[in-house]
Amino acid sequence: MAATTRNTSRERLEAKESAILDAAEQIFCKAGFDGAKISDISRAASVAEGTVYLYYHNKQDLLTAVVARFWTQLTLGAEAAIDPEASPAEQLEQLAGYHLQALLDQFEIVSLTYRERPQQEQSLDQVRDYVRIFDRVMQRGIDRNALPKGMIIRQLRDVFFGTLEFSARTLKLRNQPYDHSIVTNLLTLIIERSGSHTALSGDKEPTNRELMYALEAIQDKLLK
Amino acid sequence: MAATTRNTSRERLEAKESAILDAAEQIFCKAGFDGAKISDISRAASVAEGTVYLYYHNKQDLLTAVVARFWTQLTLGAEAAIDPEASPAEQLEQLAGYHLQALLDQFEIVSLTYRERPQQEQSLDQVRDYVRIFDRVMQRGIDRNALPKGMIIRQLRDVFFGTLEFSARTLKLRNQPYDHSIVTNLLTLIIERSGSHTALSGDKEPTNRELMYALEAIQDKLLK
DNA sequence: TCCGTATAATGAATCGTATTCATTTTAAGT
DNA sequence: ACTTAAAATGAATACGATTCATTATACGGA
């Protein structure tokens, strides 16, 4: 049966491709990009050196594939970690906790992400998909709680991921374990901010009117 | 005269070393680490290839030197950008603005910083010195305004630099220019959170922004 | 079951570039 | 001017990514 045959053949190819990817991930993480030799990777994957090039154009391509797969899996994990019933704040905390833990657990492969695509070129699609999870959670929060302008999400995204990544780097540097206070403190910053005020959204001095709004916000809170 | 002679000789060496560094910086930034050939760098510096190795152990070492010099200069520039008379909040804003601008202007060389020292090894001394500027400014703010615990500075440092770096990356990706609202919004997050601060203990009349901060601090307190 | 062919795999040969090192050049001290 | 140590040179070497001529595999048809 042609279909079955073709399918079996494809499966064999995919198994080999995935063996190469697994080997590459392992060696890249152990030795870094420059330290990883194609000969090491091919040996770990039980194929000849040349075979690697039947599946990936070159070493850089192989790294890209490893990194892409990582972020795809991370996206799945993050979606699983977020309780759809939870409040926006809780979801954000779940995402932050998951992300920080992942950064710590897989620090090497995250670092390799930056080796990928030397510079200005657009970032990996898989990374963009991952980041969209944050956007969705925030958007849901905004829809529910009428948070301020849309532009703010973009900026908060950088606060969120930038802080978590630098925090993870710091923890690694000091050989410290996961610290949940990082997550809660970050959440406090983001949520307090997005909640109360329109304020300070621009590069200008706050106007008297904005100050008035701030006072009214306090008034509102006190009345509750 | 032996002293003069020796001095002149050293000067010659230092001039050559700095020519090599300049050339390396230029080529690394243009071509990236992997794309930069020692032969390109030596040609740009008007020396033979072998000469580079009289000054730097290897290519990686050369990158380290380039990056180290960059952060040293950045530290000097940041210190110059901060007005010692200004309020802590203003100083923080000056530092953030300076940092964001530098990240945008010298994006490539900042990226190269991460090529340096593959992973867990301790980060560049020069980077640590740079980061201490933030610590000093914050500490001064705390001393003046009795901000909360000390541990918070460490975490805020990651918020500060992480956010700015990710924001810069985002701007670069979208080909957008410097955006001061990133700085002001970040400052709002950090200052509100770090605490009570009447902040008005400065030498000058409070600005509207400082009044805003004070109001929001009151708001935070009332909410607890 | 066996053959012919297309597909996949192999690993030795090639190529490019970082690094070394035997040789040459420079310049300080006499 | 001469000697000698310090600097500089660039051709030779080493190493690892990539290629490619050759070999092995497996599928479809007889």
Image: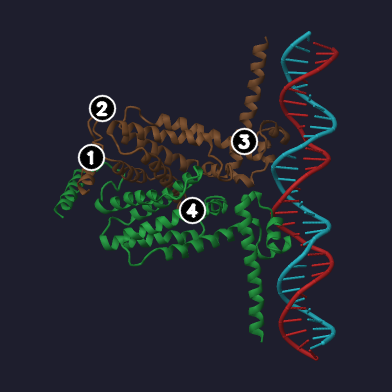
Chain colours: A green, B brown, C cyan, D red
Q: Are marks 3 and 1 on the same chain?
A: yes
Whether pointer 3 and pointer 2 mark residues with C-beta atoms closer than 8 Å, the reply is no
Q: Relative to A108, is B2 above or below?
A: above
CA gap between label 4 and label 1 equals: 36 Å
Whether pointer 4 and pointer 2 mark residues with C-beta atoms closer than 8 Å, the reply is no
Q: In this figure, what is the number of numbered marks?
A: 4
Query: Which residue in the protein does label 3 denote?
Result: B23
Query: Which residue in the protein does label 2 denote?
Result: B203
CA gap between label 3 and label 1 equals: 50 Å
Q: Determine the secondary structure under disc 3.
A: helix
CA gap between label 4 and label 2 equals: 44 Å
Callout 1 environment at 10 Å: few (<14), some (14 to 19), or many (20+)?
Answer: many
Earlier residue among tags 2 and 1: 2
Residue B54 marker: none
Earlier residue among tags 3 and 2: 3
Q: Are marks 4 and 3 on the same chain?
A: no
Q: Tag 1: residue type?
A: Ala
Looking at the image, residue D23 sits to the left or right of residue B144; the answer is right
Res B23 → quadrant: top right
Res B63 → quadrant: top right
Q: What's the chain of the residue with tag 2? A: B
- Residue found 64% across the figure and 75% down from its top: A10
Looking at the image, residue A67 sits to the left or right of residue A154; the answer is right
Whether pointer 4 and pointer 1 mark residues with C-beta atoms closer than 8 Å, the reply is no
Q: What's the chain of the residue with tag 3? A: B
Q: Determine the secondary structure under disc 1.
A: helix
Query: Can you say which quadrant of the picture contains the N terminus of chain B?
Result: top right
Spot occupied by residue B113 in the image (x, y as percentages of width and height)? 54, 42
Spot occupied by residue A37 in the image (x, y as percentages of width and height)? 69, 53
Spot occupied by residue A171 in the image (x, y as percentages of width and height)? 47, 45
Query: Which residue in the protein does label 4 denote?
Result: A103
Query: Which residue in the protein does label 1 denote?
Result: B214
